[in-house]
Image: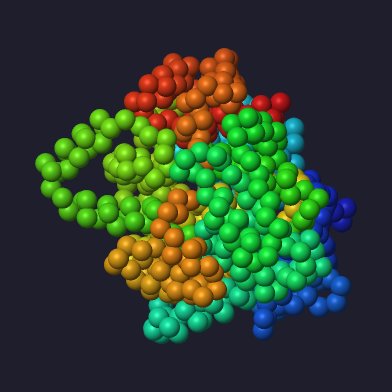
Amino acid sequence: MMHGSVENGKSGGKHLRVEFRPVEPGERWLICQEASDERYDFALIGDLLPREGGFRASGASPAKSVLDGYRRDGLAFFAGLNGSFAVAILDRISGELLLVRDHLGVEPLYYRLGEDGRIEFGTSLRALAAGTSLPEGLNFKGLTTYLLLNYNPSEETLIDGIRKVPPGYALHIRGQEARKECYWRPDFGEKLTAGLEELVEALREQMDRAVRLRVAEDRALGVSVSGGMDSSTVTAFVRRYYRDALRAFSFRCAVESYDESHYAALVARHYGAVYEQVEYTPERALEAAEMVSHMDEPQADLGIEVATYLLGRHAEGKVDLLLTGDGGDELFAGHPVYLADRAARAWERVPAPFRRPVVWFASLLPESHKKASFRVKLKRFVQGQQFPRQFHSNRWRLYYTSDSLRQLLTPQAWERTGESHRLEWLRDLYRSLPWPEELDRALFGDYFTVVQFYLRRLSLLRAFGIQARCPLLDPELVQFCARIPAEFKIPSSREQKFIQKKAMEGILPDAIVHRKDKLGHSVPMRKWLREANPLSEAVRSMLLADPRLVSWGLVRPAALEEMFEEYRKGTRDHSHRIWALYVLELWLRSWE
C-alpha cells in the first residue's frame, strides 16, 4: 500500500510525504520506491514489466528510471510502460501534485482534497478513510452506482470526499483544483487491413508476448482455469515458458448447467499441470462475511467474487503468482451482451404492436435457475429495453430502473442520491466516442466498467499472498485487438471470438476450441438463494432482521420483504439484487 500527502515544509515550500506498508500479504511483490531530484519528489508502487524496445529500469531504482522518463517525455512516457502502477509526483517549484494510474486500473489510486489545503492520496481506500464513521460518511453517488451495477466503476467512491483517479489518466492537483488529463485510451478507429491469415499469425505473436512478459521463472506460478478459451489460451502460452511444476486452479459448483470442471481438468492435463479443484457450496459462500473486509468497496456478481476468494485460500502457500484469462471477452467480443446489442437493433425495427405480445409473453414466463435457459435470456433482454441504448452493453447489466430504485430506498436516501441514478458518468464515457461501429463502442466502455470489477475481484487474492497478472489485459495487446475489424470477432454467423479460435486451432485441444456448450464460469446463486440451506437462511436473516440498510435509513423494510416474497414465489428473479444487498450489508458492518 502507498499512502501519502502533500505537506507544507518549514521553509514554506511543499514536500511529499509517503508511507509504504503491505496491507495484504500479496503486496510484497510490488515495487515500492521513492526518488527525488532538484525539482521533484516521486513515489511509485506497482508491478512494472519490461517492454520490448521500450522501458527497462536502469540500475537498482525503477522509481528513478520512471522519474527520468517523465522528465524527458512528460505524460507520454507512462503510455509506453507495461504492467501496473500508481505514481505520485510533486513539483516542489509550482506546488502541483501529479497522480498517475496505470492504463486499465490494475492498481487502485484514491485521493482526497482537504478544506485546509491538505492533499491525501493512496492505494487503499480503507487506509485513506481511517476514522470515517458510517453512515455519516457514506457517499450516495457511489452507493447509487453500486446498487445499479452491483459494483462501482465510477470516479466516486462510497466514502464521502474520496475519489478515484481514472485508469489511463493523470490528475493535476493544485490547491483545491484538480484537472484530469488522459494519457492512454484504446483506439478502435484505424482498423488493420491485413487478411485473416496474417491477422491470426500477428495475434498469436501478441498473445505469446503478453504471456511471456508475465511469466516469472523464479516464482511459484499457477494458472486459473475454467475450461473456456481465455484461461486455456493463457495456460497454453504459459507452458512454453514455465518449466517448473505448474499448478492449475479452478472451482466447481456441482449443479446442472454450472459444472464445467471436466473441461478445466482437460486443459490442465493437456499441459501437464497439477489440477486442483475447489468445491464451492452454499455453505462456503458464507465466507463472504470474511471476504468483505478485504474489499475497499463492495462488489457482487452472484458469488463469483467469493469463488475468487475461496480459490485464493486454497492456493495460499502453493503459488505466489497466478495468471488468469480475465480480459479475453473484451479482446474478442465474447460476452453474450454483444449479441444482445445486435438483437436489440433488429428488435427496434419491429413495429411496436408486434413487440407488445412478446413483452407480455416474457412477463408470464416463470423464472429459471438454469444459466443458459431461454427464459432467462428472453426476460433479461426484455428488461434491458427499459434502459437507454446509449449505455450499449451496460444496459443489460443494470438491475434497477429509476422507479424501482426509488421504491427500494427511503425518501430521505432517495433525495440524497440526487440525479446520480441517471449515470451521467456512464453516458459521458460513450458520448464523445467517434467510432460508428457499435461493437467498438461497447468494447471500449467495458474496459472502464466491467473490467474494473474483474481487477478489484482479483485483488482479493492478495489477502493470501498471491499476485494476479492478466496477460489478456496487456495494453499493447488491447490496442492491437482494438484495431481488428468487428467482423473477425463476431462474424455474420454470430459465432463469437472467431479470430481467437482461429489463432488457437492446433494449439489448444479441439474439444476446447470447438465446444458449443460454454456457459461461463459462474455460480448457481439463483438456485441456492431459493433453496433451504445455511446460505439462504443467513441472507434472509441478515436482510430482514434489522439490517444496517434499514436502521441507517437507507432501504425501506417493506421493499426488502416484497423482494424476498416475489423471489420465493418465482414471479421475479431478484437474485442479483438480493445478493448485492447482502454483500453491501456485510461491507457496511465491516466498517464498525
Q: In the figure, residue 174 lies in which quadrant?
A: bottom right
Q: Of residues 54 and 375, which is closer to you in this image?
A: 375
Residue displayed at 63% across by 50% down? 250
Q: Residue 507: image x %, image y %?
A: 55, 73
Residue 395 higher or lower than 366, as above or below? below
Report the front residue among 26 and 231.
Answer: 231
In the image, is residue 306 above or below residue 437? Answer: above
For image coordinates 49% across by 25% down, the residue present is 531
Residue 177 in the image: above or below residue 496? above
> Where residue 410 appears, x then y in whole percent?
46, 21
Residue 19: % across, % down: 83, 51
> Going 29% across and 57% down the picture, which residue do you hit?
342
241 horizontally vs 257: left or right: right
Residue 269: image quadrant is bottom right
For image coordinates 79% across by 53% down, the residue present is 318
- Pinpoint residue 430: horizontal percent, then vertical percent: 40, 57
Q: Is residue 415 visible?
A: no
